[in-house]
């Protein structure tokens, strides 16, 4: 069997997660790097065995080609070195080891589009002109880049992953609910409710390239675009990668429920200092992230305790996110008790392997002819599209069954 | 339908857990006490619905009668008041509200037996003579107490629950593996490897009374006694109630495994100040508890990280157990990260509702004709007898399926 | 020597702190209550010896009489019972033991005044009419109450302590800086910048009764009122009792400075659930508290790290304040390190003994003829009036030297 | 004025602390490295001003020459690179930047002596022969190395700093209390109670070179050697550098005392993974360290709460020490409260600047003609020789007064 050649197109191609994806993929292609597989779900014994895909034969990591869009200046190598200096967000020496590879990727990165991305994101690219093009023209421009990437690299499959900074939320009631309603708005910049993330999503959908939205931005998470994805036969995975505090919530809240312990309050404070943190200092963008984090709890517990989630940009922490959660709960006869946890995780190193896993998994969906939201991938997201359960344990069992081919992910 | 009348016999009938069971049962029988159902799994929406038993019709909490064995002096009311004074381990006023009920239970408590229970437990009952009776004679004495309890209270079913202080461990290689080998040793005190907890267990087994062993002591957790239980048609549930730190381990360790994060070390320190803590100050008894806590991790992760578990008696904490766990793990490319948690729980208030749940659930096993270790009850224990998985989420799904009648608990 | 008879007048006389002061004073007057002296600085060995006042001979706790103002309804006994039920904020049984005493105090409590106290405080007393009296008339009304208290109880000295809920901040630039400028404004309700706390303060000052302001509200913390206090010969102690997180800051920040460790960021989150918490949910009132907490850090370190302080009302925590602080600092060669702490303290139990200490100590100032801000009492406050240092260790040495008579507290 | 030329002789010259001292000193000598002064007390504004020594004029960091003894193989550059790889215990790139300097120091490192150092330290140097020389012969060998260092580098002053791994404790009752009793034992290896650290100390003392003992090993901390130091005119500073958890204890315990809060229990768990951790896995050596950590508390509080200190070697943490402390205390009326802290510090980066500070400060003592234990340096140590107070704040004030010349450090 000849291994397929696959492409992964990163929107936000010089951010921390993208840089880690790039360095990690280079390490994975190198022989004998055991540390590189840590954090890769598709490499774990839990998804291995005769019933599971032979990833490394059909599409080894070395067969993946990277490209992407980026609105910021700089190089991928600079981004990787910055992570190294940030207290080991990337192990010492890896950036330089793969400098040539990073350089090659850099040459495949194309200028990104900005469209209603919010003032905080605009501030990252001072002086950069805002296009006066219509949304549709921007979508076509993106599609041209995607197709050029596929053709010039002779790729069998291309996956698009949105990794860019969080946009402000888009109120649900401003969104048309069908493709027929949305379609004409693409020609009118002033009345189109979509932001850049959704334009990228639409370009991927219409190019038949599976889409991963790892950010809290809207992307394809609305009825009209899901409808469009089904029509185009494109699988979707999103949104908002579940990497840290929310992952813990999605295993701890079910524990409280299954022990019938009554959660009175759940307070979560998140400190982080990377570019994501800076963008989240903008109250608008923060809102998207917090909404995504907070809604989960009531669904998991079956009732809404007093809850509070904050995200605070603390510059000196760099890529290290520190979350403190305080859970006040009652046991038998109403006796009050407390659980606190502190999570100190490196955001890029947590996100990057999940992006690689999703790239592999969503090609599986494509090969099986599944389209629209792939709910079997819910375990990876804070606000999973089409999810059946918010309990991480249940989501994982669903993932295993789907990967092994026991279950299909229903097309809506 | 006439509700059954059931008895719950507590070994260690004046300890903190027993006192909380007694007060809690009295509260549950009282109308309108909503707080009393917190922490009761069998009262949660997750085990409710048309497929599930109608506990409150068939055997409401008010139909349960309590009795028990105890080696210590004092009264149940005193034990309950002590909990109240310990920073609200029992809400203020409950002990006095149910003083009459507690008094009635006290009159049904019989002197317990001591047999190789260890010097720390002996120290709790200074001056009390050690019986020179054979193990078999002690078993018969216990059986007589159990049967008298059933008859004098006209009970349809009696469940025996071991809640007494932790005994020293019994080395596995000193235990006969069949009933035929064990049986003759019961006549020879000097060569019988069993300790008191196993004599209570045997008495329950031979009386056909379902057994719950909520402690780390051996009880019926050995092949010979499990064989005897099957022969006598008695269901068994054990051992070592999973109430705090270990419960968290059994949801968090699977999370790390399912994200392919590599746990390098897991350190857990447990501080507690109740009588259990004092008994655990004895290195022998502590060993039992720590063995039970530590083995779990390697089973859950699939490899053994460096691990360390300590239990330390801190007198001033009373019934409030504080556990601090520090998990050092690696993500993608070997990047090191940390999770810490602090659990501040009240041991009695966590254990008592689970004992009540198990009492209900094991009568279900009896009614269905299941005998020996009921592995569907694994979710309740640190070292479950006959368990299929150590993952709490998986254990809970198994519990639900079994309670709803979809699955049986296999007889070995 | 005949012991003096002293009165302590509490503004906010049925709040949690006041109820704890009342119960605690009753316990202290009872023989053999060792636990009652815990937390009393004036009872500690550090302020005992031949050079220090013989408090218990000159003015034993049993010689103090309580009274106060209150805007809310209810009784002191109810307030004390509420604390008992809140997880042992008051030990079980104390409220009832001293019910008669609490009842007697209740009869000495007079209706408080409200003046520009903010909507959150107004909400605590629904339906209560807002007076249309001038500020001066309100001051006179308060003075009448204070003097009636002194005379009807034949008191040698009366101390006034402000314990009421936090008011919104008063911008410094709205405050006249001399008494001559402030004085005429007291006749014009609409242009008087003071709030109720300052009216109480003025009444105490003009009555020659030493004033303690244990709250973040303005009280006498402005130049015009300090001038008035000096003129009237009245000593002042304020403001904002240093009971928990800030106390820790005032010992930890100096530690970083004295080790030349560079604090990059200091984030503090405070959760609390009592009435104070509810009032602080109002952004205006919260501002007062946070300003008081935050300014300290730069003064202690000599530079301003990124800092963030939040106060969040979490109803279920009751009187138990939980603070989590995360300090990110750099050591040699810029190596980043972290200190986190969690403080779980009971606000009333921390504040009440300090109020009693301050009552004793400020009578000492009065007897020594000191007036205006007594800077030797800085160790007790977050925003000490006239303080020399913010380092708790230094403040405490100053306190000892002053109490022993080695130093005077300078009149400005 | 011509700057003096000074030597610093490190016992344990290729350990983590020594490597950090070496790299740090090289950075300090480089222009414009601001980060290098972080953590240096002698560079802080608190010890600057007209009354304080002009360190940078009289003996700038560039005038210091390093040498030392080491029993282990390897190079200083390797030791430095190992720290870099350990999660940034040394910033990336520094080891290589100063490779030439490190190499030069390496050539000045002489083989160390081993004498009753304990099996754990012996295990670090497998195959290395144990000398059969008498203690006196070893002392003379060390002195020869020290003098050769001074002469060949033309140094005005040499300071000796013990940084080697912790030895097992030496029972106080085996130590002679006068020099006359100790002296003859140096000729009899079999009856001499001293270990290697004390032989190094004696060599320094008799060479008139000021001694710093930064470890918990005995060094010169006994009456006989202190007597010898006074006779030889050599100043001593020791023992056991106060870098992390104990530093916090020495500011927090005084806080509890000064608020009259009653500490019921204080539990401290220390996890660390460097070579020090491995040596401390040996129960004998651990004992030295724990004794040093634990005794402090009772002295600071004035009574002994239940306390527990553990040190646990957790390999994966490398040089990062994590300490969790849990303090259970009571406030007014006996209300129980809790303070917990987690300290995540890099041991080498905390210790190294203090070693440099001590080197500077002890030359000051020498210049002032002070000899024996210099109690003004107590702020730097867990078990300070000749200390007046254990309160860090008080110790620091003493240090300032001494450095500025206001006070002398008394010769015993």
Image (cartoon, coloured by chain):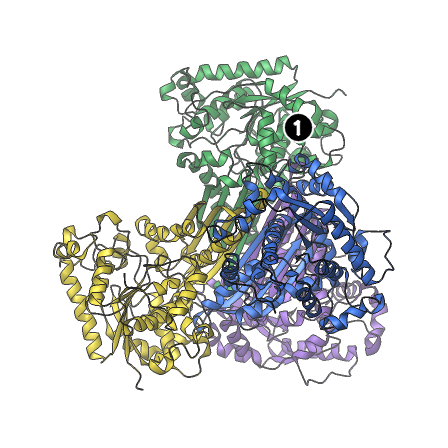
Chain colours: A blue, B yellow, C purple, D green
Disc 1 is placed on an element classified as helix
Q: Is residue C372 visible?
A: no
Q: Up-down: is C12 above or below A136?
A: below
User: For residue A311, which quarter of the picture?
Assistant: bottom right
Percent x, y for residue C42?
56, 58
Tally the marks.
Answer: 1
Percent x, y for residue B185?
14, 54
Which residue is the extreme one toward the front? A1
Write down the residue under mark 1: D96
Q: Is residue B367 left or right of residue C108?
A: left
Q: Residues within 10 Å of mark 1 (few under 14, many from 20)?
A: some
Of residues D17 and B157, the one nearer the viewer is B157
Q: Is residue A183 visible?
A: yes
Percent x, y for residue B215?
32, 60
User: For residue A235, which quarter of the picture?
Assistant: bottom right
Q: Is residue C241 left or right of residue B199?
A: right
Q: Up-down: is B184 above or below C311?
A: above
User: For residue B230, which quarter of the picture?
Assistant: bottom left
Of residues D234 and C43, the one nearer the viewer is D234
Q: Quadrant of the N terminus of chain D?
A: top right
* Residue drawn where x is 28% and y is 54% of the image: B120
Of residues B408 and D137, the one nearer the viewer is B408
Of residues B55 and C199, the one nearer the viewer is B55
* Callout 1: chain: D
Q: Up-down: is D5 above or below B315?
A: above
């Amino acid at each position: 069997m000849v291994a397929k050649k696959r492409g992964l197109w990163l929107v936000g191609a010089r951010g921390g997660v993208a840089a880690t994806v790039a360095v990690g993929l280079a390490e994975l292609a190198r022989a004998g790097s055991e540390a590189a597989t840590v954090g890769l779900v598709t490499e774990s014994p839990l998804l291995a065995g005769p019933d599971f895909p032979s990833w490394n034969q059909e599409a080894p990591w070395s067969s993946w080609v990277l490209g992407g869009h980026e609105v910021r200046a700089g190089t991928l190598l600079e981004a990787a070195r910055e992570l190294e200096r940030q207290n080991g967000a990337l192990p010492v020496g890896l950036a330089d080891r793969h400098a040539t590879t990073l350089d090659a990727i850099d040459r495949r990165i194309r200028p990104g589009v900005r469209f209603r991305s919010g003032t905080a994101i605009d501030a990252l690219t001072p002086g950069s002109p805002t296009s006066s093009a219509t949304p549709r023209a921007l979508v076509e421009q993106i599609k041209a880049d995607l197709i050029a990437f596929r053709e010039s690299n002779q790729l069998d499959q291309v996956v698009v992953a949105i990794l860019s900074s969080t946009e402000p939320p888009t109120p649900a009631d401003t969104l048309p609910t069908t493709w027929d309603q949305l379609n004409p708005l693409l020609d009118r910049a002033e009345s189109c409710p979509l932001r850049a993330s959704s334009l990228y999503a639409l370009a991927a959908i219409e190019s038949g390239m599976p889409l991963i939205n790892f950010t809290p931005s809207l992307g394809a998470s609305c009825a009209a675009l899901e409808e469009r994805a089904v029509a185009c036969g494109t699988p979707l995975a999103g949104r908002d990668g579940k990497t840290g505090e929310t992952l813990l919530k999605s295993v701890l809240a079910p524990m409280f429920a299954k022990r019938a312990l009554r959660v009175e309050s759940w307070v979560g404070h998140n400190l982080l200092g990377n570019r994501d943190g800076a963008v989240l200092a903008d109250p608008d963008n923060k809102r998207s992230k917090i909404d995504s984090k907070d809604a989960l709890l009531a669904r998991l517990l079956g009732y809404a305790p007093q809850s509070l989630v904050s995200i605070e940009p603390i510059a000196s922490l760099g890529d290290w996110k520190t979350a403190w959660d305080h859970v006040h709960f009652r046991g038998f006869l109403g006796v009050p008790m407390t659980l606190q946890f502190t999570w100190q995780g490196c955001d890029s190193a947590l996100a990057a392997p999940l992006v690689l896993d999703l790239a592999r998994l969503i090609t599986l969906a494509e090969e099986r002819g599944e389209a629209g939201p792939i709910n079997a991938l819910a375990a990876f997201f804070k606000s999973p599209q089409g999810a059946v359960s918010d309990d991480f344990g249940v989501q994982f069992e669903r993932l295993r069954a789907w990967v092994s081919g026991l279950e299909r992910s229903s097309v809506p």
